[in-house]
Image (cartoon, coloured by chain):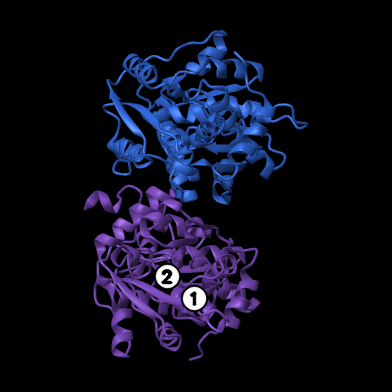
Chain colours: A purple, B blue
Amino acid sequence: MRLPERADVLDAAMRIAGYAHRTPVLHSRSLDRLLGASLYFKCENFQRAGAFKFRGACNAVQQLAPDALERGVATHSSGNHAAALALAASERGARATIVMPEDAPEAKKRAVAGYGAEIVLCEPNLQSREETLAHVIGRSGSHLVHPYDDEDVIAGQGTAALELVQEVSDLDVVITPVGGGGLLGGSACALSGQGHRIRLLGAEPKAADDAFRSLASGRLVALEHTDTIADGLRTSLGKRNFALLKRHSVEIATVEEHTIIEAMRLLWERMKIVVEPSAAVAMAPLLEQPGELSRARIGIILSGGNLDLDRLPWQTS
Amino acid sequence: MRLPERADVLDAAMRIAGYAHRTPVLHSRSLDRLLGASLYFKCENFQRAGAFKFRGACNAVQQLAPDALERGVATHSSGNHAAALALAASERGARATIVMPEDAPEAKKRAVAGYGAEIVLCEPNLQSREETLAHVIGRSGSHLVHPYDDEDVIAGQGTAALELVQEVSDLDVVITPVGGGGLLGGSACALSGQGHRIRLLGAEPKAADDAFRSLASGRLVALEHTDTIADGLRTSLGKRNFALLKRHSVEIATVEEHTIIEAMRLLWERMKIVVEPSAAVAMAPLLEQPGELSRARIGIILSGGNLDLDRLPWQTS
């Protein structure tokens, strides 16, 4: 199992330039004042297909040889990786097959179909997802692009942190959410081996704290069922990302559900941007431990902005 | 009655630089494809205090002499101008008194108080507002900064269009919402006397179409009661702005309530930004008459992003 390094992130940045957006970094005086720190928000909610996931999918698809492109790509996902891979494949003229649980939101199915991908429905559990995907790949010879446990995907996700530190100098801390760990693992690669050492923090719902428990125990702990509101973070940490987190001494902060909702609402109200709950998780540690990071220069990667606008979290609580 | 000209907008731009944000212009491939045009969104929802109103308030306050600053500023407003003037005054260390109707949303009262302004409540009708404001001014000698029928305010609002055409070349059309007309009148000044003629279009709810009827009849028509969802546009066109619209041959497009809601939702979903209903009005003509502006390069001023996140328009319809 080869782990990606900083050079792989730099290569990925060259590869996806012209395909992925270089998303803006936003700043809010009002949030800085409220939280007593200097916050720099890398807005991956403005990324194509609405989340950082396009970076990794694009980096993987761009490296496929013509004969592999001919056979297409496949994955299972009910979320942002599905749309990202569908879009990345369509730009190379390649076929994408996405295994989605039959109870996935209609809006997500429409987005995937809108990018021209074929959807294969399965039962809403991991076993059915993996069996269905194996069947698809066995039949078509499609290339699997895993949502997070994939070297090229991880390197691609690292480009967001790379752009952030290129644009904002002298950051003390970078915070990203952690689910499968592609964004956090890729960020660890991107920030390694620079002159100026930046502390990297992964933020995770307490209700899905497998990354925290994995690092605490030293062995990869799988996530049991969770219904955290941060639907993008309901996956278990991947083994490549676990190894990267250990190698680069990444820390994990866990946060309560109500803090995630509070952070999300603050971002909408003060920044006037639409972010999904998983993105707000990265700001939540500042609300729970306001003193710990005070007066620091903090980069926060807002991972995405895809959610159901008919029902907002603060309306159900 | 002197009307502002392009030079006044250029002066205003110098005066407010360093106070007002130079807001970003965003672009969305997905909306371009959907609407068959090239759209450039000037994001005044990211402006300080959440709306373009800070430009005009700042331009007015910056010109006050020390003795006038000493006596403070005053206005009546239940909306974005209230917070904008409160903020602009606080930055000069001046006192602001804002007459607000007693039924104004608590969130808006909190925002105004948060900028250090004094709030004087009145009955929720125009007569009570004006009488209360006259009383405040008579007592304190405060300088009135009218929300839209004021030369300095109009010139300040024009700086948004000025920045837009500086950043995006060869626009065919610019669209802004129109209520009291400060943004539209100021934009008319900003776009006048340039080499390249840009068509200027004001967008207005059909349920508050006093600008449309005023231009059609050639005399200023006052708005009767309206409950358009675009709460920022429930005011009547000011006389200075009426004169500017005639002078610069500005056109008006009226739009249905359901189109405003549809436009607002599209902006949230596709652009991942929080805009208020009044801002979405400027995009609504493209949904009602998709053919009329096809293949054009269109600048759209998104006026603000302040609204009650507990209840979104598509949730009540």
Q: What residue is disc 2 on? A: A176
Where does the C terminus of chain B fall, quadrant-wise?
A: top left
Side of A253 relative to B291 (left or right): left
Give the residue at x 47% y 36%.
B279
* Element assignment for label 2: strand
Q: CA distance from mark 2 to mark 1?
A: 8 Å
Give the residue at x 56% y 14%.
B215
Work out which residue is located at the far left of the displayed protein and give it: A317
Taking B244 as reference, is B276 above or below it?
below
Respond whether the residues carrying marks 2 and 1 are from the same subunit.
Answer: yes
Where residue B270 sits: x, y (%)? 48, 49
Work out which residue is located at the far right of the displayed protein and give it: B195
Q: Nearer the viewer, residue B234 or A21?
A: B234
Q: In the rendered structure, which amino acid carries the disc numbered 2? A: Thr
Could you classify mark 1 by the number of other residues whose Cα lies within 10 Å: few (under 14), some (14-19), or many (20 or more)? many
Q: In the rendered structure, which amino acid carries the disc numbered 1? A: Ser
Can residue A71 be seen here? The reply is yes
Say the numbered circle drawn on residue A187.
Answer: 1
Taking B128 as reference, is B67 above or below it?
below
